[in-house]
Amino acid sequence: MMKFLVLMFAVFACSSVLLSSSDALEIGYYNKVCPLAEAIVSATVFKHFLQNRTVPAALIRLHFHDCFVRGCDGSLLLDVTPGGEVVEKEALPNKGSVRGFEIIDEAKDAITAVCGNVVSCADVLALSARDSFFLTSGLYYNLPTGRFDGRTSLASEAIPNLPAFTLTAAELKANFARKKLNTNDLIVLSGGHTLGRATCAAFTHRLYNFQNTSRPDPTLSQDYLRILRGICPQSGNPSPRVQLDKGTEFIFDNSYYAEIVKNNGLLQTDQELLFDQETSATIRSFAKDNLSFLKQFSQSMINMGAIEVKTAKDGEIRRKCNVPNSGRISSHATE
Ligand code: HEM
């Protein structure tokens, strides 16, 4: 299977989109020290994808939640910190919601078995998100690598950094701008909601008493409102999960935007983008042009993957993705 995957990815790499990247990162960073690293991640993600179609959604979201808190440094993967603080994965937006940690651990361990401890967990996570996009969209892009792992993870930093599902368009733009991502990145990356599901807890506030009006969110279509009320009764169980893209849950495509144009956006934050002057036209154009969305998603994932990346100066190559190395800073070249 490994040979097949290497070949498959090589073929797609030849026809992949050429995209710009950050200076600290480099395409093929591991070519010398661990030429099989990317193929091992691909094979691991593919194996899990064959067992569970929801894996790509999990890994793309895991990468997003990692990058928005302390940069793309694998801080979300940690179970412990040197200072014994409560870690990011225990914070409200993450706990019981983000998933896929075991896939990252498995890929990292498989790479270490072949090459030693030379590939960062942050890169394994970023590559797994890239491969998840490929498996669900069919479009491949080269991902710059060379991220180092952080040594700290603080639950208290999750809520101030991760966008809440009740933010206005202006607040979403400001949240992304703090990560040096522009409004186009916001529109494009929100398209990650073409995959996966949300619990009733994330949108029931729209269904009955939106913003204390005793009425539902007026931007929600009547048909969709009826369906959602059937799944999420008022004061009912907050746990049922509804697909974020009413059209196609497992295919990475533009139907998420087509549904928003029909007022069938599940999250308030997604629907918001149709009514903001600056974002509305792009939402409508993505609704009609799948390839343009997919190409821009590739570039915005590269942009997101470059948020506050750590280097050998302030990071390490973790031996185990859930535990920081004890006190010592390692380097890609020497371990
Ligand atoms: C723009 C601000 C965003 C907000 C407010 C937001 C909010 C949410 C919420 C509330 C959920 C459901 C969680 C649950 O109920 O368990 C969710 C799921 C998801 N989000 Fe976002 N998100 C945002 C941006 C993004 C971005 C940038 C990506 C990736 C590029 C992303 C990818 C996903 C995916 C794939 C899922 C489904 C996960 C699964 O099924 O396991 N989101 N998001």
Image (tube, rainbow, N blue to C red):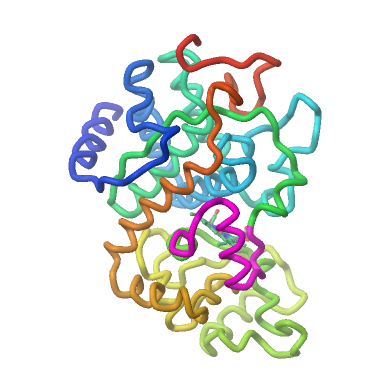
Q: Nearer the viewer, residue 295 or 128?
A: 295
Residue 66 lies in what quarter of the image?
Answer: top right
Say if 257 sits above or below 96 in the image: below
Q: Nearer the viewer, residue 199 or 305?
A: 305
Q: Specify the segment rendered in magenta.
A: 163-185
Q: From the viewer's perspective, tell me whether residue 208 is left or right of residue 39.
A: right
Q: Position of residue 136 (x, y in %)?
A: 35, 53
Determine the residue positioned at 69% across, 16% down.
326
Say if 255 sits above or below 40 in the image: below
- Indicate which quadrant contains ligand 1: bottom right
Determine the residue positioned at 38% across, 49% down.
133
Determine the residue positioned at 36% across, 51% down.
298
Q: From the viewer's perspective, tell me whether residue 182 is left or right of residue 93.
A: left
Q: Which quarter of the image is occupied by the N terminus?
A: top left
Q: Is residue 119 magenta?
A: no
Q: Position of residue 327 (x, y in %)?
A: 70, 16
Determine the residue positioned at 32% across, 22% down.
31
Q: From the viewer's perspective, tell me whether residue 65 is left or right of residue 184.
A: right
Residue 240 lies in what quarter of the image?
Answer: bottom right
